Amino acid sequence: MYDPKSLIAEEFIDHQEILESLAYAEAHKDDKELIESLLQKAAPKKTEQGISCAGLSHREASVLLACEDPEVLERMYALAEEIKLQFYGKRIVIFAPLYLSNYCINGCLYCPYHSCNRHIPRKKLTQEEIRAEVTALQDTGHKRLAIEAGEDPVHNPIEYILESIDTIYSIKHKNGAIRRVNVNIAATTVENYRKLKEAGIGTYILFQETYHKESYRRLHPTGPKSNYAYHTEAHDRAMQGGVDDVGLGVLFGLELYKYELCGLLMHAEHLEAAFGVGPHTISVPRVKPADGIDPAAFDNGISDETFARLCALIRIAVPYTGMIISTRESQAVREKVLRLGVSQISGASRTTVGGYTEEQRPTDTEQFNVSDQRSLDEVIRWLMEAGHIPSFCTACYREGRTGDRFMSLCKTGQIQNCCQPNALITLKEYLMDYAAPDTRKVGEALIAAELENVGHEKVRRLAREHLAAIEEGRRDFRF
Ligand code: SAM
């Protein structure tokens, strides 16, 4: 029985509810009146506190996804773009993944780290190696990491992850620092989530891979991850352990995308219903080639067009949730979906264990092939030239603006007074410490122009003071 408030996976991701929603969507996909009302409902509205957005339910979003009218599609893209600009401005937050270990006891059919893969070298970074990797990352300008590890209670126990987080936060090299560590590790216990919270993590990210239970079982034949309910209920346990920023994601290509979007939105609705706060982020990975992995083997690959449509719909349906895109996607695809609502991207990623300290891009332990292989400086310059503001901001969680505090600031639009100046201040740090001369020139002009868009006069004055102080060598200001 479908119940978004339930803490039982099969009740908040109810298969029957998804099938009925998809049938409803199919039956109403040409219902012009309904579609018009959905587009109206999802549009940003002026309120006393600022601007607000109603979002869409899983069923409503499914109708828009099923609609094939090119005019409606254009309107959806325009709406996604409008929401993006309204709530996130031109800012794009930058991060890098850090692979700690590829030891894994799971049997995920799409992942090269699966335990039956005997010909990839297995590697786990020592604390000394983590220091070297983080120093290399800091030297390019990164301030925010997502740590990744396979699931292996012997090689990668929670103590190893916690020690690694401590090491990462402790490294201060030149003006470098990692100010936020997000964590993408296997589903675990409330007690372990509490320990992660105490270690100072930002977001706990876990991809569902697929919401379709039968497919999930087939794709995860062995290992702890084969337990659908334990995996699907992980974000609830994270919330119970005090991690109030959690990230969702689907690995697109495994199952039918219409089913997945519906499940993903039901999951977001569940978090809101059960804990009063929706997901902090949604990631949209697609299956990519990797050692022994051919994406074509999974039948449900989606075109770039469909991918863009999914991104736009996520933006419209859950306007207050950040959207993440990785270097799995090419420059061209990233360019397109950045406009449609993506708010965070990784840059200059190495998806190998120990990859950042190697001169040549290594591929032997790569988790997936990286499509966008540009340097961080190239990515930063490209973003700026395309009209975005790259941001290395980590202020919210360091100021305790997490979970429902963050969401309520977001929903009233007040967060804008922090985000815009924080983006400019952290970009300035990047330009001073790491940028190539040409990138710096482009960045300085952008900061000068965008400072004028800081609405609050006092904040604008303070931002100007901080920028001058950064010029003189001081660092780490925030609103
Ligand atoms: N072991 C943890 C887990 O199972 O959730 C950590 C996550 S894993 C290192 C990161 C993510 O990479 C997975 O959740 C999966 O969605 C994605 N991934 C695995 N194989 C992939 C592939 N061939 N192409 C693209 N993404 C892949």
Image (tube, rainbow, N blue to C red):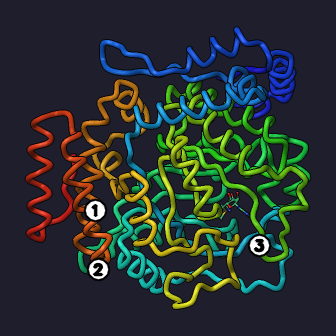
**Ligand 1, what quadrant?**
bottom right
- Of residues 101 and 366, which is closer to you in this image? 366
Question: Horizontally, is 93 left or right of 147 in the view?
Answer: left
Q: Residues within 10 Å of mark 2 (few under 14, many from 20)?
A: some
Q: Is residue 229 above or below residue 251?
A: above
Secondary-structure class at tag 1? helix
Q: Residues within 10 Å of mark 1 (few under 14, many from 20)?
A: many
Q: Which residue is mark 3?
A: 290
Question: Horizontally, is 382 left or right of 392 in the view?
Answer: right
Q: Residues within 10 Å of mark 3 (few under 14, many from 20)?
A: many
Q: Quadrant of the rendered structure where residue 26 is? A: top right
Residue 34 x, y percent position in the rendering:
70, 11
Q: Which residue is mark 1?
A: 443
Q: Earlier in the sequence, mark 3 or mark 1?
A: 3
Distance from the alpha carbon under mark 3 to that under mark 1: 36 Å
- Of residues 33 and 473, which is closer to you in this image? 33
Q: Which residue occupies 37% across, 40% down?
A: 89
Assess whether mark 2 and mark 3 are in contact (beta carbons under 8 angstroms): no
Distance from the alpha carbon under mark 3 to that under mark 2: 33 Å
Distance from the alpha carbon under mark 1 to that under mark 2: 23 Å
Residue sitting at the far bottom:
359
In the rendered structure, which amino acid carries the disc numbered 3? Ala
In the rendered structure, which amino acid carries the disc numbered 2? His
Q: Which residue is mark 2?
A: 173
Q: Is mark 3 within 8 Å of ligand 1?
A: yes
Name the image quarter holding the N terminus: top right
Residue 359 x, y percent position in the rendering:
52, 91
Q: How many marks?
A: 3
In the rendered structure, find residue 6 and report the number of the disc placed on it: none
Residue 6 can be seen, yes or no: no
Q: Which residue occupies 51% across, 31% down?
A: 319
- Of residues 122 and 348, which is closer to you in this image? 348
